[in-house]
Image: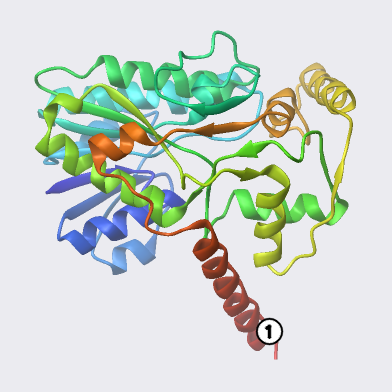
Amino acid sequence: MRILVTGGGGFLGQAIVKRLLARGDEVRVLNRGAYPELVALGVDCRQGDIADRAAVVAASEGMEAIVHVAAKAGAGLERGAFYSANVEGTENVLAACRVHGINTLVYTSSPSVVHAGGDIEGGDESLPYASHFVAPYPETKALAEQRVLSASAAGLRTVALRPHLIWGPGDNQLLPRLIQKNRRGIRLPAPHKLIDTVYIDNAAQAHIQALEALQATPSIAGRAYFISNGEPMTIQTVMSRLLTAAGQTPRIKTVPLPVARGLGSAVEGVWRALSLRGEPPLSRFVVEHLATAHWYQLDRARDDLDYVPQVSMAQGFERLRARMAVNTRSGQERLR
């Protein structure tokens, strides 16, 4: 197939692109930056902002399917920037599908669209969207997901995947931030709450299987799917094993939940009052996800997409450890 991957230069995007190439697909990517490593693989790289409709429509010309990964993620408070990238960007992708008659769209969403502030233990896709959000990211991802799923009709088949906390070798988001916070010590309000995560290979695999399933079984169109490793672990265990795999000594302690909530609200309030840009060092959104359980059933993904994680958590941690060790040795050799 001829497939456009928006955000194809990112952590998840590149993993998806490489699997599409291995399948023999003709792949084009749309990114804001340049990615010579993808050009070297034979990928047709287009530069443009997902919020620019003309750029999205132009990049989609001649494509048969789109995997829409591009998004603005994080705990920032600037709603306009999140809305532009996540909602308007997704509307541009849907417009491109209509203009060019593209009939297959896989959208990368987030489990946070259903997180209403309490524990989610073994939740499934019957969970409603949260009625209130404490940050722009989950709000705008929920709005975008609803647009994607409601657009599914006879001429356009869509699904939304909700991968939970993607990690693994090459991660340029979760692990670097975790390492940075660990330098000063990490404080957890609920270290024994269970959470889901997903190893990068499994997350990419799910997107390929969603593409295949939409082609083979059009009746699944309009559905959302939770994607994880299916091995819930405590927040403290996940953080400790990631840090250990990265060659770090975990410095994790417990902080009372009321204190964490109070600090999150206070820091966020100061951030808004001073109109500061970027992400605050702490927020209600971050505290909410550190203080609650959030893990999900994979039954629908197994039944509809034939999704079964191929890399276990233990295997993933070992792969990450091995890659980080190689990177460390390479860095030391360059310094000699």
Decide: is 37 above or below 88.
Answer: below
Q: Residue at x 36, y 16 (%)?
A: 146
| Circle 1: residue type | Gln
Is any atom of residue 159 visible in this view?
yes
Residue that sits furthest to the top in the current view: 131
Q: Position of residue 318 (x, y in %)?
A: 56, 69
Q: Nearer the viewer, residue 301 or 222?
A: 301
The residue where tag 1 is placed is 332
Q: Quadrant of residue 240?
A: bottom right
**Dot 1, crowdedness within 10 Å: few (<14), some or many (≥20)?**
few
Element under label 1? helix
Q: Position of residue 212 (x, y in %)?
A: 17, 43
Q: Quadrant of residue 55?
A: top left
Q: Position of residue 98 (x, y in %)?
A: 16, 22
> Residue extending furthest bottom?
336
Q: In the depicted view, which residue is nearer to us: 233 or 91?
A: 233
Q: How many marks?
A: 1
Q: Is residue 59 visible?
A: no
Which residue is located at x 65 percent, y 58 percent? Answer: 242
Classify residue 246 as left or right of residue 268: left
Give the side of residue 40 with respect to residue 226, left or right: left
User: Residue 100 appears in which quarter of the rendering?
Assistant: top left
Residue 232, x across and y down, in percent: 56, 43
The colouring scheme, among rainbow, by chain, secondary structure or one colour, is rainbow
Quadrant (top left/top right/bottom left/bottom right) for the C terminus: bottom right
